[in-house]
Image: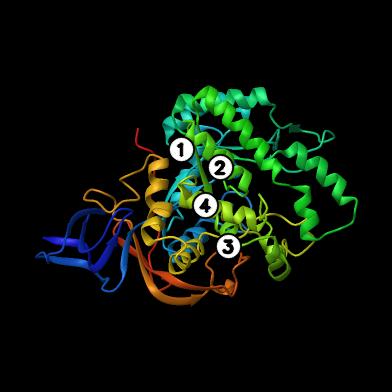
Amino acid sequence: MKWDHIIRGGEIVTPTSQYKANIYVKNGKIVTITDSELEGEAKEITDATGLQVLPGLIDTHVHSRDGGATYKEDFFHSTQAAAAGGITTIFEMPNTNPTINNVENFHKQVENLHSKAHVNFGVWGICLGDINNEDLQSLSEAGVIGFKYFWGYAVNKHTFQLVYNYSNEMEDVFPPCDDGEVFAMFEEVAKTGQTFAIHAENSDVINRLTKSFEKSGKTDYETFLASRPNVVEELTIQTAISMAKQTGAKLHILHVSTAEGVHLIRQAQKEGIPITAETCPHYLFLTNKDYETIGPSMKVYPLVKFQKDQDSIWEGIADGTISFVCSDHAPHTEEEKNGDLWTIPAGMCGVETIAPLMLNAVSEKRITLQQFVSLLAENPAKQFGVFPQKGAIQVGSDADLTIVDMKKQAVIKKEQLHSKSKVTAYDGYKVTGMPVVTIVNGVTVMKNGEVTGGILGKLVIPTK
């Protein structure tokens, strides 16, 4: 037998077990898992002695700006960053240019991304209300990974790009959807059976408070927080839960940032309402008090909030209320992030740092390594209908593997990030536990921090 790849001597870690075994790969698939040494040669052999072998990690929430504002980031660089950070699959968000609002644009985007992909990828479809409700079923059939709705955002009439800070005076803009239009969206996505993910912030409250607080002339983080209080997430989640209960849509709350949000989601789950949730490292490792030392790079939407919120989010991870962790990778240039909080854009790099940060949480015993695998591999794969093709170490699964060294210490340095833009809140952050090998479709694409693979990522679509 001639194997494509043999991974020897590592400790395989799944959400339910840890054991030493060798993995044999052929044609991009795991074909044998055994503690024996099988006969045959291999194109590639990886010695994983003393290391942990995990299912390939998945980042479900990535904005690569491609097409669109590629001066900030593009898919070539974001997937290099993913590979460097131990991520084998990313799901690309749909607010690109053109936006992923119909099948034609979906296929164009797949072709575009496929030519630049160092790792595997899925593509989200966008919900724009009456503008594209009739396209949702065909988008589902074409292979979108799920549907996203940016609740409360207006849309440009010509480009269908999101419009931030909407006001009634704006021209050539579709105003934010009213609740009736949102309800119709829920009904249409429910028919597809796919995930309906929402950015949960009440823009009416935010816009009114922002106008009031901006007049004060204050630019400190506490004032900015007051313009986007916890209630804006709470109100939107409450409404979404009611609509999911009525329509049966598989509601998913993106980047949960508040204690109130966690509580509402937990209660809805207890009632049997189909609702899941995610959070991001910035809500797990930062609070409002960090702004003084970190500065504008930590501005994200929803905002990083208070210690009580961080504590509740960790509790949500511990009890399963929150299913997985993702990066919300959304780079901007340093020049764009250099300004006052009212005017600079929200977002930062994250796809390369999510795994080191969460592995450090393992080292600090906030979670176990088995929980880490659930949060970054198995749970997202199950959520989006790609398990056990992804998120598993099983015979027949794709040979996507992340090998980690839990003893390795490192310092996150922004200048070493592989994204085009280097803005991160974690520059200088010390971690214990690092991805040291990333294997995509049976091929090593990163070893010891160096990206070695080429353009070999493939489109991932849900299994029907």
Residue named by callout 3: 285
Instruction: Give x and y (percent) for residue 11.
Output: 27, 66
Q: Earlier in the sequence, mark 2 or mark 1?
A: 2
Q: Is residue 420 above or below residue 393?
A: below
Dot 2: what SS? Answer: loop
Residue named by callout 4: 315
Residue named by callout 1: 144
**Image-based side of 431 in relation to 395, left or right:** right
- Residue 341 falls in image quadrant: bottom right
Q: Earlier in the sequence, mark 4 or mark 3?
A: 3
> How far apart are the two marked residues, 2 and 4, measured between alpha carbons?
30 Å
Q: Residue at x 51, y 43 (%)?
A: 277
Q: Which one is in front in this view, the residue at disc 3 or the one at disc 2?
A: 3
Residue named by callout 2: 94
Q: How many numbered discs, if any? A: 4
Dot 4: what SS? Answer: helix
**Image-based side of 223 in relation to 189, left or right:** right
Q: Residues within 10 Å of mark 4 (few under 14, many from 20)?
A: some
Identify the amino acid type marked 2.
Pro
Q: Nearer the viewer, residue 28 or 303?
A: 303
Q: Residue at x 28, y 74 (%)?
A: 50
Q: Earlier in the sequence, mark 3 or mark 2?
A: 2
Q: Earlier in the sequence, mark 4 or mark 1?
A: 1
Identify the amino acid type marked 1.
Val
Instruction: Give x and y (percent) for residue 299.
Output: 69, 58
Q: Residues within 10 Å of mark 2 (few under 14, many from 20)?
A: many
